[in-house]
Image: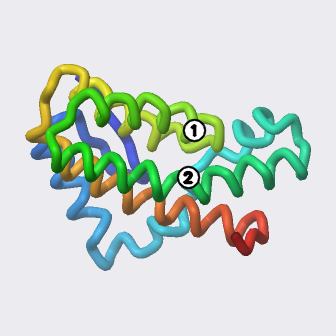
């Protein structure tokens, strides 16, 4: 069983726990959760070899591409297109890892696994949570790295 931690919330890879995590993220007492970094700074700097130029280039690419990937995930889920859903998730997971968003990469890996098995029932709340978290991640990159993309 996969246990995922986002902030101080743990959940396993079933629908009920995903719903609980979504509800917890949207409650007023979790406002401070938005200040929690969605990326690991050390991983990000190691991957970019501490190069500010490479870092900005990589983050610009991610900020541009992540919303497109999320739209594709939603579209292929709505179409129940397991093959395309799998392909998008398979490509998105390493992008998240490269920017140090390892917790979010775990969510995408779960989407990938379920798509490969043709399981669609539990994916909508997972993709919604991923979209919420990626939105915060992108905002954090823009603020933390002074990016006006």
Q: Which mark is residue 127?
A: none
Rendering coords of residue 77 (x, y %): 21, 45
User: Where 130 falls versus 132 (above or below)?
Assistant: above
Residue visible at 43% across and 58% down in the picture: 133
- Using the image as rendered, state which of residue 57 and residue 8 is in the foreground: 57
Q: Earlier in the sequence, mark 2 or mark 1?
A: 2
Splitting the image into 4 quarters, where does residue 108 fall?
A: top left
**Left or right of residue 51: residue 60:** left
Please name the residue that numbered disc 1 is placed on.
95
Real-space Cα distance between discs 2 and 1? 9 Å
* CB under 8 Å between discs 2 and 1: yes
Crowding at mark 2 (Cα within 10 Å: few <14, some 14-19, many 20+): few
Q: Secondary structure at mark 2?
A: helix
User: Where 75 falls versus 48 (above or below)?
Assistant: below
How many callouts does the rendering have?
Answer: 2
Q: Which mark is residue 65?
A: 2
Rendering coords of residue 119 (x, y %): 13, 30
User: Where 10 falls versus 138 (above or below)?
Assistant: above
Q: Nearer the viewer, mark 2 or mark 1?
A: 2
**Left or right of residue 99: residue 109:** left
- Using the image as rendered, state which of residue 79 and residue 20 is in the foreground: 79
Rendering coords of residue 31 (x, y %): 41, 75
Residue visible at 40% across and 36% down in the picture: 88
Image quarter (top left, top right, bottom left or bottom right) of the N terminus? top left
Residue visible at 36% across and 56% down in the picture: 71
User: Where 132 falls versus 105 (above or below)?
Assistant: below
Crowding at mark 1 (Cα within 10 Å: few <14, some 14-19, many 20+): many
């Amino acid at each position: 069983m996969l246990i995922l931690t986002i902030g101080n919330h743990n959940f396993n890879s079933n629908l009920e726990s995903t719903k609980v995590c979504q509800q917890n993220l949207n409650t007023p007492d979790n406002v401070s959760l938005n200040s929690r970094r969605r990326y690991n700074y050390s991983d990000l700097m190691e991957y970019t070899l501490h190069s500010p130029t490479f870092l900005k280039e990589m983050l610009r690419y991610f900020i541009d591409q992540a919303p497109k990937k999320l739209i594709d995930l939603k579209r292929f889920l709505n179409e129940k297109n397991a093959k395309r859903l799998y392909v998008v998730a398979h490509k998105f997971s390493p992008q998240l890892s490269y920017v140090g968003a390892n917790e979010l990469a775990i969510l995408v890996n779960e989407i990938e696994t379920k798509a490969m098995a043709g399981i669609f029932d539990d994916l909508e709340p997972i993709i919604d949570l991923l979209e919420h978290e990626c939105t915060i991640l992108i905002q954090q990159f823009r603020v933390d790295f002074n990016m006006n993309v």
